[in-house]
Image (cartoon, rainbow, N blue to C red):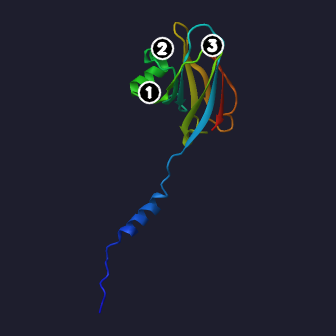
Amino acid sequence: MKRKTNRLPSLFTIALIFLCSSSFVRIPSTVSYKCMIQMANYSGEKAYVVVSLIDEQGNYVKTLYVQGDDPEWFPDLKQWWAFSHGANENIDAVTGATVGNGERNIISLAVDSSQVDNGHKIRFESAVENQEYYTVDAEIALNSSTIRNKVEGKGYIRYIRMVPN
């Protein structure tokens, strides 16, 4: 007696084909860094600092961290606010307390690994209530060979140090 064979692939075969083909899809990976922000000695209120990812043409890509949790003062960070407010970024998850004169803060930053060694930079923007605003207080090239270098600030930030996490 002839046995009938099912010509439709089994569910198991379909699942196996899907899993094997999806293993060739490249999922973007992230690189994380520990970043120490050492503030300069200055007089006045605590500083608001925004950390942003900047592309090779100098355009904002995304906000990585906001140091300061009162949205009333965000517009004082003029360049970032023009980008962030217009893009309606959700910054609630990346806010932290302000730091003041001589204090330091250690934060974690994560970027897509494709942005490392590709001309991107990490920009630190700072402002203090009723004082100056620094569009580029410090800027670090997102370069694996130089990321560990100490970078001096130009305003309220004394220096920045980053290490891969």
Calculate the distance from the C-alpha at mark 1 to the C-alpha at mark 2: 17 Å
Question: Which residue is found at the position 55% from the left and 8% from the top?
Answer: 131
Where in the figure is residue 83, as x and y percent of width and height?
Answer: 44, 24
Is residue 19 placed above or below 48 in the rendered structure? below
Closer to viewer: mark 2 or mark 3:
3
How crowded is the residue under tag 3: few (<14 C-alpha within 10 Å), some, or many (20+)? Answer: some
Where in the figure is residue 106, as x and y percent of width and height?
Answer: 61, 27
**Circle 3: element type:** loop
Give the residue type at disc 3.
Answer: Asn
Q: Quadrant of residue 162?
A: top right
Q: In this figure, which residue is indicated by the disc labeled 2?
A: 76
Question: Which residue is found at the position 45% from the left and 20% from the top?
Answer: 81
**Circle 1: element type:** helix
Q: Nearer the viewer, residue 49 or 140?
A: 49
How crowded is the residue under tag 1: few (<14 C-alpha within 10 Å), some, or many (20+)? Answer: few
Give the residue type at disc 2.
Answer: Asp
Calculate the distance from the C-alpha at mark 1 to the C-alpha at mark 3: 25 Å
Q: In this figure, which residue is indicated by the disc labeled 1?
A: 92
How crowded is the residue under tag 2: few (<14 C-alpha within 10 Å), some, or many (20+)? Answer: some
Q: Earlier in the sequence, mark 2 or mark 3?
A: 2
Decide if residue 55 is in sight here.
yes
Q: In this figure, which residue is indicated by the disc labeled 3?
A: 101
Label number found at residue 80: none
Decide if residue 91 is in sight here.
no
| Quadrant of the snapshot with the N terminus | bottom left
| Quadrant of the snapshot with the C terminus | top right
Give the residue type at disc 1.
Answer: Asp
